[in-house]
Image (cartoon, rainbow, N blue to C red):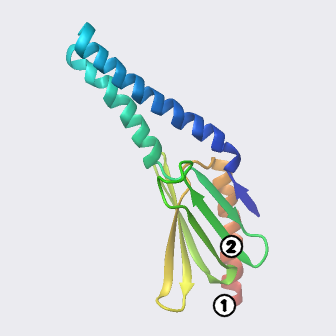
Amino acid sequence: MRLSNRNKASVYNFINTVLMMMVVLGILGFLANEYRFNVLESESYLLIIIPVLMLILFHLNGRQIFEYDSDGEALNFKNRNIIPFLNKPLHDEFPKYKLIKYDIISIFFIKRLYITVSSKTNGSTMLKYQISYLTQKEVNDLKLSLNKVVKANKEKKD
């Protein structure tokens, strides 16, 4: 099964651009208010604070692009940001039989995928992916696919 939200990259780029423009316009509005109009008084700081907080929340929510491929004998995970230099992109590929378990953690609007993979050196390794920008249907499809792999691995062990 293949799962990808790469086609939404243009939407995420647009949102990022709008937020950056709001920050710039907020700074310009703040400076205009401070040095020329002085209408807002101390509330003029909100012109900077609110757009900056929105931009920070957008990027703290995690990497925007998530790709998953379970076709063949390997599982392939890719997780990257729309701005290449902001975060290091993640790319992991391993055989299906190494998947031990997975967990999806949801806290408010932040979702994380934790994959536990068997490893020769230290027994098991945990891989972390940010899936906040996946729709609920995509998350359910991902769970279904990973459940099949985990179930098949348990049947092979028994």
Which residue corresponds to mark 2?
75
User: Residue lying furthest right in this view?
Assistant: 72
Identified at 49% across, 54% down, the residue is: 85
Q: Quadrant of the N terminus?
A: bottom right
Q: Is residue 157 left or right of residue 81?
A: right
**Residue 84 position in % (x across, y down):** 54, 53
Left or right position of 146 against 44: right
User: Which-is-in-front pick, marks 2 and 1?
Assistant: 2
The residue tagged with tag 2: helix, strand or loop?
strand
Q: CA distance from mark 2 to mark 1?
A: 19 Å
Residue at label 1? 157
* Rendered image quadrant of residue 24: top left
Q: Earlier in the sequence, mark 2 or mark 1?
A: 2
What residue is rendered at 34% in x and 25% in y?
27
In which quadrant will I find the C terminus? Answer: bottom right
Regarding residue 39, the answer to whether it shows in the image is no
Residue 7 appears in the rendering? yes
83 horizontally vs 96: left or right: left
Mark 2 and mark 1 residues within 8 Å of each other at the beta carbon: no
**Rendered location of residue 81, percent (x, y):** 54, 52
